[in-house]
Amino acid sequence: MNDVDSLELYYSFKRCFSDLHTWIQDTIWPRGVFEIVKVVDVTQNHEGIEGKTWCFFAISTSVHVYSFSAVKPYRIEPEGYISGDVSTRVPLNGEEASGSNDLSGSGVYSEETWINLLRGIVKYEVVPVPQF
């Protein structure tokens, strides 16, 4: 993906998910850089029925990748949702493959759910400090 595509994706995300964009800015911006993978804005489907607007985005650290999907509230899912999962970038000690898990805190499309997902990230990122 080139810089123009990335910029168009960013502006599409900002337009379709302005509230989520604000929540991200308020909590992890500018230190937490996120990658927007896909934004789909379907205002109506082929039958003229209200469609859904959804996106995928990710946040990476040196050890983990946190992938998120979000669906704006719409007729079929009036509360929408935000969910996340975590995967390791490298295999853990004694394992041959990297793993993934659901991230705790998934739920309805709200700032509270976003904060709960961030709490889930903190649980993965905090590591014991060796005692001297």
Image (spheres, rainbow, N blue to C red):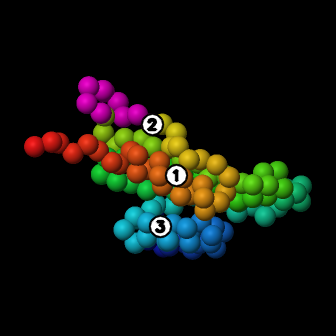
Q: Which residue is more in the foreground, 128 or 13?
A: 128
Quadrant occupied by the N terminus: bottom left
- Give me the C-alpha separation between circle 1 and circle 3: 11 Å
- Give me the C-alpha separation between circle 2 and circle 3: 24 Å
The earlier-in-sequence mark between 2 and 3 is 3
Mark in front: 2 vs 1: 1
What's the mark number on residue 27?
3
The earlier-in-sequence mark between 2 and 1 is 2
- Give me the C-alpha separation between circle 2 and circle 1: 15 Å
The percent position of residue 19, horizontal first and vertical second, equals 63, 70
Could you tell me which residue is drawn at 43 percent across and 66 percent down?
A: 28
Q: Quadrant of residue 114?
A: bottom right
Magenta segment range? 92-100
Q: Are marks 2 and 3 in contact (CB under 8 Å)?
A: no
Residue 82 visible to the viewer:
yes
The percent position of residue 55, horizontal first and vertical second, equals 61, 57
The stretch drawn in magenta includes residue 33: no
Q: Which residue is mark 2?
A: 100
Q: Which residue is more in the foreground, 32 or 26?
A: 26
Magenta-highlighted stretch: main secondary structure?
loop
Density class for disc 1 (Cα within 10 Å; few <14, some 14-19, many ≥20) is many
Q: Amino acid at mark 1?
A: Leu
Q: Which residue is mark 1?
A: 117
Mark in front: 2 vs 3: 3
Q: Amino acid at mark 2?
A: Ser
Could you tell me which residue is drawn at 47 percent across and 52 percent down?
A: 119
User: What SS does tag 2 mark?
Assistant: strand
